[in-house]
Amino acid sequence: MQKHIKMAAIASTVMTLAAVGGSQAQQPPPQFPDMTFFITSVGGPQGANYGGLEGADRHCQTLAAKAGAGGKTWRAYLSTQAVGGATAVNAKDRIGKGPWTNAKGVVIATSVADLHSPNNKISAETNVAETGRLIPSRLYTVNQHDILTGTQADGTAFPPDKDMTCGNWTKSGEGNAMLGHADRMGLRDDDASKSWNASHPSRACDAASLVATGGAGLLYCFAAN
């Protein structure tokens, strides 16, 4: 009798743990419906190759939807260059007018001009993903402060003479893309090294090369409406 009681107790405990585990597994991701700015929690599967601006925007939109903010139109902060017959696109012209607020309720910038001024609030403390977690800065062992932008400091596209956008976001091998330092930290004590959108070019366009300098192929995403 005691053996049967013990077996029943064990079975009951196992079922309870399984139910708790299942409950935890089914927990929905944190929801931030008022968020209008985030850094992607993950990069794309092919390094800097997002399939162009459309694919990068889709990545932002998909992640925003999971966080309860999919009712807005999301745009990746990326520029493209006038190469191969393409028309140059300025990152600053495609992200709306602002203001932009992160998942924690911090206003990152009030306008496009404010975003591209020293007054913006992009920093190691405010760089939050759509999940609500902090993007690790240079101070962490796993460092992801390099963000893809392909953009000059004023938010405009580079001239077409040198690839700074990994082939307008279609290359995942050789090439280069301008990166920004989301944590506003640099190896040198100058504005360029600490720039949030134009710090230094990537080594190449593949995922491994982006990780090697302290990145993960992440994007800045802004709600354009």
Image: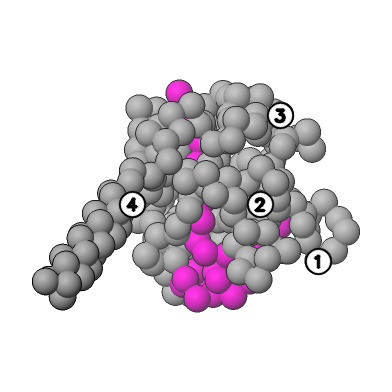
Element marked by disc 4: helix
Q: Nearer the viewer, residue 62 or 210?
A: 62
Q: Which residue is mark 3?
A: 114
Q: CA distance from mark 2 to mark 4?
A: 32 Å
Q: CA distance from mark 4 to mark 3?
A: 41 Å
**Mark 4: which amino acid?**
Gln
Q: Which residue is mark 4?
A: 24
Element marked by disc 3: helix
Q: CA distance from mark 2 to mark 1?
A: 14 Å
Q: Nearer the viewer, mark 2 or mark 4?
A: 4
Q: Which residues are magenta?
A: 199-225
214 shown above or below 43: below
107 shown above or below 161: above
**Mark 3: which amino acid?**
Asp
Q: Nearer the viewer, mark 4 or mark 3?
A: 4
Q: Quadrant of the N terminus?
A: bottom left
Element marked by disc 1: loop
Label at residue 187: 1
Residue found 66% across the figure and 24% down from its top: 110
Residue 38: x %, y % from top left: 53, 42
Element marked by disc 2: loop
Residue 36: x %, y % from top left: 51, 31
